[in-house]
C-alpha cells in the first residue's frame, strides 16, 4: 500500500483536498489507517535516501574536492582576464603627446627658478632621505619633479597595506615605503622604480571607503594608491601626465637630432672640410678612447629593434612568453658589449635592467606556491621557469624556489592520504608517495641544474629536511600510536626499503633515516623489554609447574605442529601421547620471546646491536631467575623433574632458535646470549 500511496502522491494531477475528502468519507478508522501508512511511507523514503547518500558518499566527497579545485583555478583565470582587460582599456584611453605640444615645442620658462626649487631638483638629497636608492641618482639629466605621501591599498579587497611616498622624476616614478622605526635622517626605504613609458594611470571613482584613489598599471602588475585629499590626487595626476608628455616630446626631438647628425655625416664628401674633420676625429678616436664623441653611443643605439626593445619585452612578459623575453635579453646583452660607453648607453641599460627585474619577478612567481595555484603538477611543470631563470643568471633563486615548490607539492600529496585504521597500510602509502616524489625531484633537479654543482649541496640539505619532516609524520603514526613491536618493525622495514631504492639515482639517505629513527626505536625496545620482564614475574606467581595435559592424541599432535610453526621441535618433551613436560607458562614465554627476537633483528642496526643483545639477555635472565627460585622452593620438590625439563627446553630450543635467527641475518650471536645458554645447561 505504501508503493500505491507513493504513486498517487507523485501524479501530476494529484489533488490533496479531493484525496482527503474521499478518505474522510470512509470514517475515522480509514483516516487512522491512512495516517499509519503515510508514516510508514515517510520512514521508507528517509531510509532509501540515506542508503543513496551512503552509496555515493565517496563520489560526493571526490566531486566536491574537484569542484573546489576547479573553482579556485577559474577564479584565478577570471582575475587575470579582468586585469588584462582593464590594462588594455586604460592603454587605449591613455593620451599620447598632443599635436599642439609637438608643433609649439617646449615653452620657455618665464621666470628663473628660486634657489630652493633648484635644490629640490637636485637628486642628491634623496640619498639622505631614501634608503637603497643610490642607483637612481646615477642617471645623468634625471631631475625630481614632484613628490607626495600616499597609502598603498590592495586592488582586490581595498584594504590599506602600508604608507608610501611617491617621487616623480623626469623620466620615471620611484616609490618608497615609510620606515616606522628609523634611525638618523632616513625616512623611507626604496621599493621600486617604474619608467613613465611603461606605466599607465587609471582613475578610481570614489565608492564607500575608497576615496581619492587611483591605479598605476605596470607590466606585469597593478598597484592601487590613495591620496590624503582630492587636491593632492589631482595635482599628482596632472603633473604626472604633463611629465609623460614632456618626456615623449624630448625623446622624439633627441631621435630626430641624432638622425639628422647621422644623415649629415653620411652625406659629407670625403674631400670636404667637414669630411676631413670627421676623418681627423676618427683618427683621434683610434689614438685615444677617451676622446670619442658623446654622440657615438647614441648613434649606436639608433637601430629600430633597439628602440622597440623595451616595448617588445613588456609585450612578451605580459603574454608570459618567457622564453622569447630571455632570448631577447641575451641578444641585446651580446650586442651592447660592442657599444662605446656613454650616458646614452648607461640610460638604455637601466631601462633594460628594469625589464629584466620584471621578467625575473614573473619567472619567480611561476615557482612560488600560493593557495590559488594548483599543486597537482609534477616537477616538470617547474622546469620551464627554472631554465629561464638560469639563463638570466639567477640559478641560486631558481634552485631555492624549485625546492620550495617541490616541498609544497610533497606536503599536498601527503595530506591527500587517508588513514583508514591499518597503520601498516597507511605507512606503505606514505612511503610510496614521499620517496617517489623525492626520486622524481632528484631526477628533475639533475636535468634542470646539470652543470651547477654548487646547487647540489642545497639539494642534499633540502632532502635531509624533507626526510626529517617525513620521520616526524612516521613517528606520530607509528611510535606514538602505541602499535605493537611487530607493526613497528613492518613499518620501519617499509621505510628503509623505499629509502634504499633512492641509491639507484645517487641519493643515499639510509644513514640519515636510521639516525633519525634510532632514538624512538630504542625507546620502544626498552618498553617492550620491561613489559616482558614484568609479565614473567607476574605469571610465575601462579605457576604450579605441572605437565600440560592435552586431553588426547589428536590435540597433542596439533600442539606439536603449532610449536613447530613457532620454530620449536618438542617431540622429545611429549609423553603418554597426550602430556607435555613443558608448562603453559613456558610455552607462552617461548612464543613471545621468539616473536620479540625476530622483530628486534628486523630493526637491527649497528648502533642498536648492543641494545638488542642486552634486551634479550635481560629477558632470559629474568626467566632463569624464576627457574632457580622454583627449584629452591620446598613446595615444588615433587615437580623438580618438570622444572628441569622446562629449563632444558629454554636453554636448548628457545636460545637455540634465537641463535638461528642471528645466523639467518648473517650476524654472530651475542656473547651474552651464548653465556646464558651455557648457564641454562649447567642447571641440574
Image (cartoon, rainbow, N blue to C red):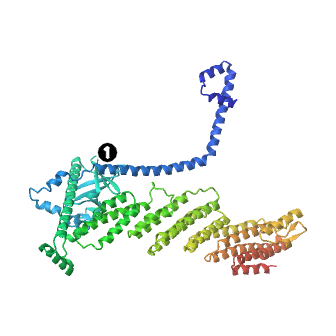
**Could you say which is closer to the camera, residue 122 or residue 91?**
91
Asked if one can make out residue 404 in the rendered structure from this viewpoint, the answer is no
The location of residue 214, given as percent across then percent down, is 28, 50
Residue at left 33%, top 71%?
A: 334
The residue positioned farthest toward the top in the image shown: 25
Dot 1 crowding, Cα within 10 Å, few <14, some 14–19, many 20+: few
Residue 293: where, in percent of width, then height? 18, 73
Residue 683 at x, y percent in the picture: 79, 79
Horizontal side of 457 relative to 669 (left or right) equals left
Residue at 23% from the left image edge and 48% from the top image edge:
229
Rendering coords of residue 492 (x, y %): 62, 68
Residue 245 seen: yes
For residue 641, what is the image quadrant? bottom right
Q: Of helix, strand and loop, which one carries label 1?
A: loop
- Residue 454, picture quadrant: bottom left
User: Which residue is most to the right?
Assistant: 576
Instruction: Pick out the residue farthest to the left.
Output: 111
Depicted 106 relative to depicted 269: above or below: above
In which quadrant of the rendered image does the C terminus lie?
A: bottom right
**Relative to 64, 228 lies left or right:** left
- Compared with residue 515, is residue 199 higher up or lower down, i.e. above or below? above
Q: Residue at x 14, y 56 (%)?
A: 106
Q: Is residue 18 positioned above or below 89 on the image?
A: above
Assign the N terminus to one quadrant of the image: top right
Task: Out of 425 and 9, give the one closest to the viewer.
Answer: 9
Q: Is residue 520 left or right of residue 546?
A: left
Q: Which residue is mark 1?
A: 209
**Viewer-proximal residue among 653 and 429:** 429
Amino acid at each position: 500500500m505504501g508503493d500505491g500511496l507513493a504513486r498517487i502522491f507523485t501524479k501530476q494531477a494529484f489533488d490533496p483536498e479531493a484525496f482527503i475528502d474521499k478518505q474522510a468519507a470512509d470514517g475515522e478508522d480509514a483516516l487512522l489507517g491512512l495516517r499509519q501508512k503515510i508514516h510508514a511511507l515517510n520512514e521508507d523514503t528517509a531510509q532509501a535516501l540515506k542508503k543513496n547518500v551512503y552509496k555515493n558518499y565517496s563520489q560526493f566527497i571526490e566531486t566536491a574536492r574537484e569542484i573546489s579545485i576547479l573553482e579556485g583555478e577559474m577564479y584565478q583565470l577570471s582575475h587575470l582576464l579582468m586585469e588584462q582587460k582593464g590594462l588594455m582599456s586604460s592603454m587605449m584611453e591613455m593620451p599620447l603627446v598632443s599635436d599642439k605640444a609637438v608643433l609649439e615645442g617646449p615653452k620657455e620658462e618665464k621666470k628663473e627658478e628660486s634657489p630652493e626649487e633648484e635644490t629640490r631638483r637636485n637628486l642628491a638629497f634623496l640619498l639622505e632621505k631614501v634608503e637603497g636608492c643610490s642607483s637612481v641618482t646615477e642617471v645623468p639629466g634625471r631631475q625630481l619633479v614632484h613628490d607626495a605621501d600616499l597609502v598603498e591599498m590592495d586592488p582586490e579587497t581595498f584594504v590599506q597595506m602600508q604608507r608610501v611616498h611617491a617621487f616623480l622624476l623626469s623620466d620615471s616614478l620611484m616609490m618608497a615605503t615609510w620606515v616606522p622605526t628609523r634611525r638618523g635622517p632616513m625616512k623611507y626605504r626604496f621599493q621600486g622604480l617604474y619608467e613613465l613609458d611603461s606605466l599607465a594611470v587609471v582613475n578610481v571613482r570614489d565608492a564607500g571607503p575608497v576615496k581619492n584613489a587611483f591605479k598605476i598599471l605596470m607590466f606585469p602588475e597593478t598597484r592601487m594608491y590613495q591620496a590624503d585629499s582630492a587636491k593632492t590626487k589631482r595635482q599628482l595626476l596632472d603633473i604626472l601626465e604633463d611629465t609623460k608628455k614632456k618626456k615623449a616630446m624630448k625623446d622624439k626631438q633627441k631621435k630626430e637630432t641624432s638622425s639628422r647628425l647621422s644623415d649629415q655625416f653620411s652625406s659629407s664628401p670625403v674631400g670636404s672640410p667637414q669630411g676631413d674633420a670627421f676623418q681627423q676625429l676618427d683618427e683621434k678616436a683610434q689614438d685615444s678612447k677617451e676622446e670619442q664623441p658623446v654622440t657615438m653611443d647614441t648613434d649606436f643605439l639608433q637601430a629600430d629593434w633597439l628602440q622597440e626593445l623595451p616595448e617588445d619585452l613588456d609585450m612578451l612578459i605580459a603574454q608570459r612568453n618567457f622564453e622569447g623575453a630571455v632570448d631577447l635579453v641575451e641578444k641585446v646583452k651580446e650586442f651592447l658589449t660592442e657599444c662605446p660607453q656613454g650616458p646614452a648607453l648607461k640610460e638604455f641599460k637601466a631601462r633594460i635592467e628594469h625589464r629584466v627585474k620584471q621578467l625575473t619577478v614573473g619567472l619567480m612567481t611561476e615557482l612560488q606556491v600560493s593557495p590559488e595555484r594548483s599543486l597537482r603538477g609534477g616537477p616538470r611543470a617547474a622546469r620551464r621557469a627554472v631554465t629561464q631563470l638560469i639563463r638570466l643568471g639567477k640559478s641560486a633563486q631558481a634552485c631555492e624556489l624549485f625546492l620550495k615548490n617541490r616541498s609544497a607539492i610533497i606536503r599536498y600529496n601527503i595530506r591527500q592520504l587517508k588513514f583508514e585504521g591499518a597503520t601498516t597500510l597507511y605507512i606503505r602509502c606514505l612511503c610510496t608517495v614521499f620517496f617517489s616524489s623525492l626520486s622524481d625531484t632528484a631526477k628533475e633537479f639533475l636535468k634542470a641544474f646539470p652543470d651547477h654543482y654548487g646547487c647540489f649541496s642545497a639539494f642534499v640539505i633540502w632532502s635531509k629536511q624533507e626526510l626529517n619532516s617525513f620521520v616526524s609524520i612516521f613517528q606520530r603514526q607509528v611510535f606514538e600510536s602505541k602499535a605493537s613491536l611487530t607493526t613497528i618493525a613492518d613499518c620501519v622495514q617499509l621505510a628503509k626499503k623505499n629509502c634504499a631504492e633512492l641509491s639507484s639515482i645517487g641519493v643515499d639517505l639510509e644513514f640519515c633515516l636510521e639516525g633519525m629513527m634510532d632514538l624512538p626505536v630504542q625507546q620502544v625496545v626498552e618498553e617492550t623489554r620491561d613489559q616482558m620482564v614484568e609479565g614473567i614475574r607476574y605469571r610465575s606467581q601462579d605457576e604450579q609447574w605441572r605437565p600440560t595435559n592435552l586431553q588426547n592424541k589428536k590435540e597433542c599432535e596439533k600442539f606439536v605442529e603449532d610449536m613447530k610453526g613457532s620454530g620449536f621441535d618438542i617431540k622429545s618433551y611429549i609423553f603418554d601421547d597426550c602430556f607435555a613436560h613443558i608448562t603453559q607458562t613456558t610455552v607462552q614465554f617461548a612464543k613471545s620471546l621468539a616473536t620479540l627476537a625476530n622483530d628486534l633483528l628486523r630493526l637491527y642496526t649497528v648502533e642498536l646491536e648492543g641494545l638488542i643483545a642486552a634486551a634479550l639477555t635481560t629477558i632470559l635472565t629474568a626467566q632463569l631467575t624464576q627457574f632457580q627460585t622454583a627449584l629452591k622452593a620446598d613446595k615444588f620438590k615433587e615437580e623438580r623433574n618438570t622444572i628441569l625439563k622446562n629449563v632444558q627446553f629454554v636453554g636448548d630450543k628457545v636460545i637455540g632458535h634465537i641463535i638461528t635467527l642471528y645466523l639467518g641475518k648473517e650476524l654472530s650471536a651475542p656473547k651474552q646470549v651464548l653465556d646464558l645458554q651455557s648457564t641454562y645447561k649447567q642447571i641440574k
